[in-house]
Image (cartoon, helix red, strand yellow):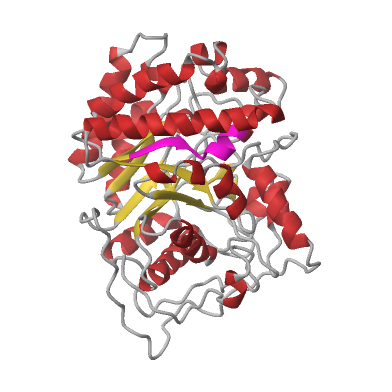
Amino acid sequence: MSRPPHPEAHAAQPSAISRRGLLGATTAVAAGVGLGASGLRAASASAAPGTAPFVHAPRVPGWTDGFHFGAATSGFQAEGFSPDSNWRRYTDRAARTGRVDPVRNSVDFRHRYRSDLHLAAGMGLNTFRFGIEWARVEPQRGRFSAAALAYYDDLVAGIRSLGMSPMITLVHYVYPGWVADQGGFLGPRTLGDFERYARMITARYAEQCSMWISINEPLVFYGHEKEIGALTDADMPRFLDRVAQAHRIAHAAAHDANPQARVAVNEAFLPAVTPVTDALFMNRVLDTLDFVGIDYYYGAALNNLTTIAAAGGDFAAVRPQPDDIYQACHHYAQAFPGTPLYIVENGMPLSDGTPRADGYTRADFLRDSLFWLQRARGDGLPIVGYNHWSITDNYEWGSYTPRFGLYRVDVLRDPGLTRHPTSGVDAYRELTAGAGPAANYRPVMAPAVGSFARIPQSWTMPSRVDGPRAQL
C-alpha cells in the first residue's frame, strides 16, 4: 500500500490530505452522532440452510480474460537497495532523528522476486501488481539504466512464465532525486520528463502488460509530499492539476503503444467523504479511466468508530469492516456508470505481526472481503479483479510495525528476511480455486450497523448477507 502516511510507532503531525487526515474527516462525521464503537461479530461462518445458488456474473465488455485474483507490492516499500529519490532522502533524514524506521533494504524483493513470484503463483493467483521505480530506471535525467531495465524485464517475464498477468504502477509516491531537485511534480520540466519515462516503459512492455496504474492514490500522494516537506497547503490545487496531466500522459502513452491497454488511477475509498475526494481528483480524469481502481481498507459506522485510532496512527486498532467493500463498489458503479471496477488494493494490518485481540484473522478477512465482492457481482456490478495488499510485509511509509503481508517478514529482527506464511495463504489458495467463498459461506464479521460508506444509501439499503451472489 500505500498504508499509513505516518508511522504507527512514531509521533508525527498529520498531513492536510493523507490517509490519516482523510480518516480524521470521516471520523469527525461519524463522531457527530455521539455513539460508541462497539463491534459486532457474526455468530458463525458455517453453512446456512436454504442457501440460494449463485447467479450469473455480469459480462464486462473488453474483459474476457476472467476474474483477476492478484497480490500487490511497490518498489520503494519492498525492493530495497533504494536509489536516490524523494522518499530515500526523506527517510534518511527522518531516521536519524527517530521519526521513522530506517528503510534498510526492506524485504529485498529486488533480489528475491523470483521466489516471491512463486509464492504468489502457489496461491493460484493470476495477476501480480508491482511498481517500476522511476528513480531506479532513470537515475540521471535522460539516462536510463540498462541494469535496472534488465531487472524489470526479468520480473515481467517471471510473472508471465508463472501464468500471471502483470499490473504495473508508474509512480507510487516516489520519483528520482533529480526530479525533486527541479521542484517535484510542480517543476516546469517534470511533466515532459514523466512523458519520456512513461512512453519508454509502456512501449517496452506493451506486448507483455495490458493493465497500468498511472499514479498511485493522487490525494494520498499529495499528503505524503506535504509530509516530507515538498509541498504546502497552497500547492494542493496545482499539484493535483499536474498529477491529472501526468495521468493523461500515461494513458495516451499506453494506448499509443497498445490500443488494448487498460489504464487507471487508484484512489482510496474513504467513507462519508468519497464524493468530496471524487470531486478533488477522479472526476478530473474520468474520460481517461479504462477502469476504476479502488483501494478499500477502512469503514466507519454507528457501531464502528474505531477509525479514530487510524486518525491517530494506530491502524491495527481499527476494527475491520469488510462489508463496506460492497458499499464502495456500489458508490463507484453509480459515480462512474459503465466503467469496470477493480479492487487494486485491499488488506488488513496487524501490529508487528501480533494476532488481533478479537481473533479475527487474515484468512477471515480474505474470505469475508471476497464474499462481499460476490454480493456486489450478484447485484450486477462490473467488478473485474481483486489485489490483496500485500504479498509480503514491507516498509509502510515510515514504519515496519504495520504488517499487511500474506507472508510475514520481520525486517528489523530477522537478517535472513524469511517469508513465513500467514493464515491468508491457504485461505487465498482455497478462494482462487473456488472463485470466492462457497455458496454456504457466511461472513465471520457481521455487517456494520449504520454504515457511513455512502449516506443515505448505506442506511436505506444496508449490506445484506442474504442477497444474490455471483462467483468471481
Residue 86 rendering spot, x and y as whole percentages = 55, 20
Residue 401 in the magenta stretch? The answer is no
Residue 26: which quarter of the image?
bottom right
In the image, residue 201 sits, relative to residue 299, either above or below, namely: above
Report the magenta residues as a range: 212-222
Which of the two residues, 414 or 197, is positioned nearer the viewer here? 197
In the image, residue 363 sits, relative to residue 187, either above or below, namely: below
Residue 3 rendering spot, x and y as whole percentages = 56, 42
Residue 52 rendering spot, x and y as whole percentages = 35, 85
- Seen in the image, is 253 located left or right of residue 245? left
Task: Examine the rendering and report whether any part of residue 224 can be seen.
Answer: no
- Seen in the image, is 336 located left or right of residue 185? left
Residue 203: which quarter of the image?
top left
Q: How many marks?
A: 0
Q: Residue at x 64, y 58 (%)?
A: 272
In the image, residue 302 sits, relative to residue 213, either above or below, namely: below
Residue 221 in the magenta stretch? The answer is yes
- Seen in the image, is 99 located left or right of residue 157? right
Q: Residue at x 58, y 17 (%)?
A: 89
State the residue lying farthest toward the bottom. Answer: 50
**In the rendered image, which quarter contains the C terminus?**
bottom left
Residue 204 rendering spot, x and y as whole percentages = 23, 25
In the image, residue 146 sits, relative to residue 107, either above or below, namely: above
